Amino acid sequence: MNQQKQPLDPENAVLNISLKKSPGQFIFLSKIFLKKFGKVDLHGLGEATKTVAQVAETLQRKQYVSIKKIETQTYTPEQGGKKIKLIAQLEVTEEGKQMIEQDLQRNKSDW
């Protein structure tokens, strides 16, 4: 069971946020999406909306991104009930492009 780590290659700019990973892990994943697409849409349901807000705010505070749009929706799962959905649309800044490149190169050497 020797698994080789492979680089993440997202197919679209949507990153689904859950409670299974820490906000720091989602910040790192967001940088990968931002490098490839120049933007990322963070989607979170229910309690994960807090993590969406935290990731978006942290990336903006550190000047990696500008927040273009924040949207809330009501989602109705098949099991019934209602959940809130938060979508944050982020766009990389010029300074952010350089910082992301440096961060990912530094982390790549840790693999």
Image: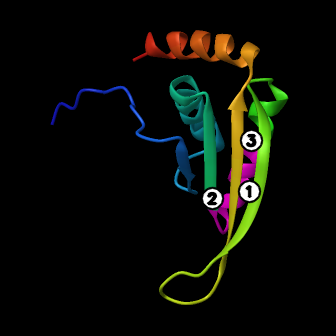
Q: Say the numbered circle drawn on residue 44.
A: 2
Q: Which residue carries the number 3 mark?
A: 56
Which residue is outermost to the bottom?
80
Where is residue 85? Give x, y as percent: 67, 66
Magenta region = 45-56
Instruction: Say which element carries label 1.
Output: helix
Where is residue 6? Give x, y as percent: 31, 27
Instruction: Say which element carries label 2.
Output: strand
Where is residue 53? Give x, y as percent: 76, 50
Distance, label 3 to label 2, CA atoms, is 12 Å
Looking at the picture, the colour scheme in use is rainbow
Badge 3 density bin: few <14, some 14–19, many ≥20, Cα 10 Å: many
Q: Say the numbered circle drawn on residue 24.
A: none
Compared to 67, does 105 lie above or below? above
Q: Which of marks 3 and 2 is nearer the N terminus?
A: 2
Please name the residue shown 80% across and 23% down the image.
Answer: 63
Left or right: where 55 falls relative to 21: right
Please name the residue shown 24% across and 27% down the image.
Answer: 4
| Amino acid type, mark 2 | Gly
Q: Which residue carries the number 1 mark?
A: 50
Q: Which of marks 2 and 1 is nearer the N terminus?
A: 2
Residue 46, quarter of picture: bottom right
**Residue 69: in magenta span:** no
Q: Quadrant of the N terminus?
A: top left
Compared to 23, does 62 lie above or below? above
**In the depicted view, which residue is nearer to us: 32 or 11?**
11
Q: Which numbered disc, 1 or 3, marks the residue closer to the eye? A: 3
Please name the residue shown 53% across and 81% down the image.
Answer: 77
Q: Which numbered disc, 2 or 1, marks the residue closer to the eye? A: 2
